[in-house]
C-alpha cells in the first residue's frame, strides 16, 4: 500500500514523509508561524484579494496572515495588492495548483 504524503503548506518535508495521508488541517505544528489563516481555494478574481483585504483589516500591525488560493491570477494580484497597500509579502510558495502567501500586516 502506498502511503500518502501531506500536501498542506504548513508541514516541513520531514513531517510530510512521516504522515499517513493527513492533510490540512493536519495535526502537526505548522512550519510557518502565523496569526490568521485564510483559505481562498475555489475563489477566483477578485475574491482572493477582497477576502485578504478584509482579513488584514481585522488584524493588528505585525501580525502574520497565511492565505491559500488556487486562482492562477492570485500570485500577481496579491503581489500588486501588497505593494499598493504597504503590507509585506513575506513569501509566496506553490504546491501543485495551490499558492501559499505569507503576509505581514504593516
Image: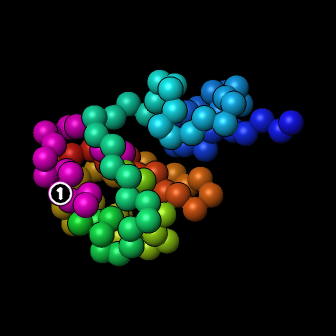
Q: Quadrant of residue 41?
A: bottom left
Rendered location of residue 71, percent (x, y):
46, 69
Residue depicted at 86% across the width and 36% down the height = 1
Residue 52 in the image: above or below residue 23? below
What colouring does the structure picture have? rainbow
Q: Which residues, given as a range, are shown in magenta?
A: 51-66
The answer to whether residue 45 is visible is yes
- Is residue 92 in view? no
Indicate the secondary structure of the residue bearing disc 1. helix
Q: Residue furthest right?
A: 1
The correct choice, above or below, for 35 with respect to 72 in the image is above
What residue would you read off at disc 1? 54
Residue sitting nearer the eye, 104 or 27? 27
Estimate the x, y position of residue 9 in percent, counting from the top left: 52, 43
Residue 96 vs residue 17: left or right? left
Q: Where residue 86 sits: x, y (%)?
A: 20, 57
Q: Position of residue 78 (x, y in %)?
A: 34, 64
Q: Is residue 18 above or below residue 36?
A: above
Residue at image position (52%, 25%) is 28
Q: Is residue 78 magenta?
A: no
Front residue of this view, candidates 40 and 81: 40
Q: How dense is the environment of label 1, judged by Cα within 10 Å: few (below 14), some, or many (20 and up)?
A: few
Which residue is pictured at 44% across the width and 73% down the height?
Answer: 73
Q: Going 43% across and 48% down the picture, which residue do you hit? A: 91
> Considering depth in this image, is 87 or 53 the residue closer to the camera?
53
Amino acid at each position: 500500500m502506498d502511503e500518502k504524503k501531506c500536501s498542506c503548506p504548513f508541514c516541513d518535508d520531514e513531517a510530510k514523509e512521516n504522515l499517513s495521508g493527513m492533510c490540512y488541517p493536519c495535526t502537526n505544528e505548522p512550519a510557518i508561524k502565523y496569526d490568521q489563516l485564510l483559505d481562498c481555494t475555489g475563489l477566483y478574481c477578485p475574491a482572493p484579494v477582497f477576502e485578504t483585504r478584509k482579513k488584514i483589516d481585522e488584524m493588528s500591525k505585525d501580525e502574520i496572515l497565511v492565505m491559500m488560493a488556487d486562482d492562477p491570477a492570485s500570485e500577481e494580484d496579491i503581489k500588486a495588492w501588497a505593494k499598493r497597500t504597504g503590507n509585506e509579502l513575506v513569501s509566496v510558495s506553490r504546491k501543485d495548483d495551490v499558492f501559499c502567501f505569507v503576509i505581514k500586516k504593516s
